Amino acid sequence: MKNLSSLAAAAAIALLGFGAAPADAQDTEFGLSGVNLFKSCLKNQSGTRQECACVTGFFAGAMDKDAFMMMSVVAPFIDENGEVPDIDGAQAAAYAEQTRQGMSDARFDEVMGIFAAGEEMGDYADDICVPVGDAN
């Protein structure tokens, strides 16, 4: 099973929430960001469905909404080794999301700093979510 912390520095994975929610509550930008991060985790073979769901929920709860949503647009650019082969595409997506959110340059820099320092948070997510993924 791959270590999910390598993805944490660039992007993370997010869950829609716990329990059943009304259909209209599930169709939010935040929820769709979670779906995008979850699918990126699966596509990159970063973990089982259970692990990806767990890590998605972990980061959704651990991060501010704007940072989480920023991760959702960067995550698809991360490969199975935690690398970003199309850095220009990832940067363009991040800047487009900054504009879409109306995020200030200072906040954008802060969010990028969170991503760069994400190894510790990723390790913590692994401590929780790898056992969850193994619990069948």
Image (tube, helix red, strand yellow):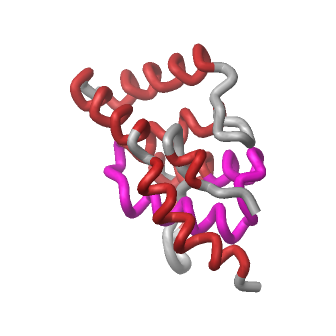
Quadrant showing the N terminus? bottom right
Residue 19 vs 88, above or below: the answer is below
In the image, residue 55 lies in the stretch drawn in magenta: yes
Between residues 90 and 35, which one lies in front from this camera angle? 90
Visible residue check, residue 25: no
Between residues 72 and 88, which one lies in front from this camera angle? 88
- Name the residue rendered at 51%, 64% in the picture: 125
- Name the residue rendered at 64%, 54% in the picture: 38
Between residues 53 and 28, which one lies in front from this camera angle? 53
Residue 93 vs 82, above or below: the answer is above
Report x, y in % for residue 102. 30, 27
- The reply, left or right, for residue 125 in relation to residue 120 is right
Q: Which residues are magenta?
A: 38-66
Q: Where on the picture, by quarter, is residue 95?
A: top left
Report x, y in % for residue 60. 44, 58
- The reply, left or right, for residue 52 in relation to residue 96 is right
| Residue found at the very far bottom of the displayed protein | 136
Between residues 134 and 68, which one lies in front from this camera angle? 134
Residue 77 vs 91, above or below: the answer is below
